[in-house]
Amino acid sequence: MKMNARWEAVLDRDATADGRFVYAVRSTGIYCRPSCASRKPRKNNVLFFEFPEMAEARGFRPCLRCAPQDAGCDPRLEKVRKAVRYIEEHADENPTLAVLGRGVGASPHHLQRTFKRALGVSPRQYIESLKAQNYKELLKNGSDLAGAGYEAGYGSSRGVYEGASRYLGMTPATYKKGGAGVSIRYGVTSCRLGRLLVAATEKGVCRVSIGERVGELVSDLKNEYPHAILSRKDDELKEYLNVVAGLAEGAPASGSLPLDVRASAFQCRVWERLRSIPHGNTMTYKDIAGDLGVPEGARAVGSACARNPVALLVPCHRAVRGDGSLAGYRWGVERKRKLLDWEKKQK
């Protein structure tokens, strides 16, 4: 089930979606079934997870009203769910595929294939992503670097810097300080889609966001890097702003800007595939997944699109549903429609 369909299921309190996913609300720290009768959350506060264990691994608590942990799941995915649960309980032990298979009663080959089809990543990639996320939360909660690394399951400081740094976008020490010491310049301009913010470190663009109000765009940037040295430099970033504003109005890319983003291995593969889609064209989530060797990973592709931090530079708007209709877009489906229309006219 794609991201937009999941959100529609939550809005409709669709009981038929129970067991297919759970949703978590950042502001309350609680996760629920799609059919939960609790107050409807704001969309930008919601995260979706395939299984309850995945939500709990991120620190969310089950709703006492709808008991989402008891909703069950698609029988075909039960071994994957068991594998996720096993990983959550043994992540600090770095279980091998063979150990994981014995733990859930499946052959390593079958588990590897089923797990990757369901979630879009291998068990090993999921373990690394989970460790990095746990490490990130420990740092946020005040743990020291060495203690957090040990508790998250990294066996050495080298493992921390080689593993976690890929997911944090900066060194662990810098992330722990909320980006303290990192200088991030940002600029804002107007385009036909609204207001456009481009932020960059000395290495390259780290964020591109679209909205109606400058204050909200800047606030989101500050929330991500609360202690970084943020400075508005419209003039210094004029070239970057012009390039991105052109993309926002459907113009073909005139060159590539340097990027400073970090992501999981699967997200990187999805983003690279998106960047290879010709200007004015689209590609379905399913076809992208197929190209990446995970034919049943369409929803994982959708999730990677939703986590794209540099809109337009990584053209996630070119990913569409199987029937060609538009799925959810972080910056609004109407903006996605306009972008695609403008690009087609300038092919």
Image (cartoon, rainbow, N blue to C red):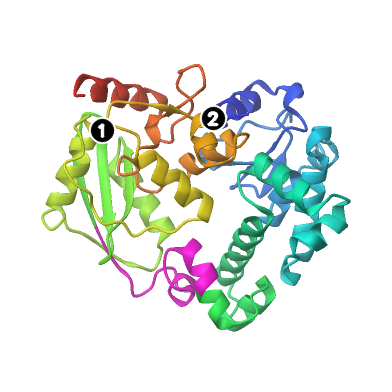
From what the image shows, is residue 233 above or below residue 307?
below
Compared with 67, 160 (above or below) is below
Return the residue at label 1: 194
x 24%, y 34%: residue? 248
Q: Secondary structure at mark 2?
A: helix
Determine the secondary structure under disc 1.
Answer: strand
Q: Residue furthest front?
A: 109
Q: Position of residue 76 (x, y in %)?
A: 80, 34
Quadrant occupied by the C terminus: top left
* Figure check: 1 above or below 49: above
Front one among 29 and 287 = 287
**Mark 1 nearby-residue class (10 Å; few <14, some 14–19, many ≥20):** some
- Image check: 251 left or right of 42? left
Q: Which residues are magenta?
A: 162-185
Q: Mark 2 sits on what residue?
A: 286
Looking at the rendered structure, the kind of residue marked 2 is Lys
Q: Is residue 23 visible?
A: no
Q: What crowding class fits label 2: few (fewer than 14 Cα within 10 Å), some (14-19), or many (20 or more)?
A: many
Q: Position of residue 156 (x, y in %)?
A: 61, 82
* Residue at 65% in and 24% down: 9
| Marked residue nearer the N-terminal end (1 or 2) | 1
- Res. 50 image quadrant: top right
Q: Name the spot of residue 277 as percent of width and height, x first.
A: 35, 34
Task: Measuring from the top left, give residue 10's x and y in whole percent.
Answer: 64, 28
Which one is nearer the viewer's eye here, 48 or 99? 99
Seen in the image, is 91 located left or right of residue 145? right
In whole angstroms, how far apart are the C-alphas of marks 1 and 2?
30 Å
State whether residue 305 appears in this view: yes
131 horizontally vs 35: left or right:
left
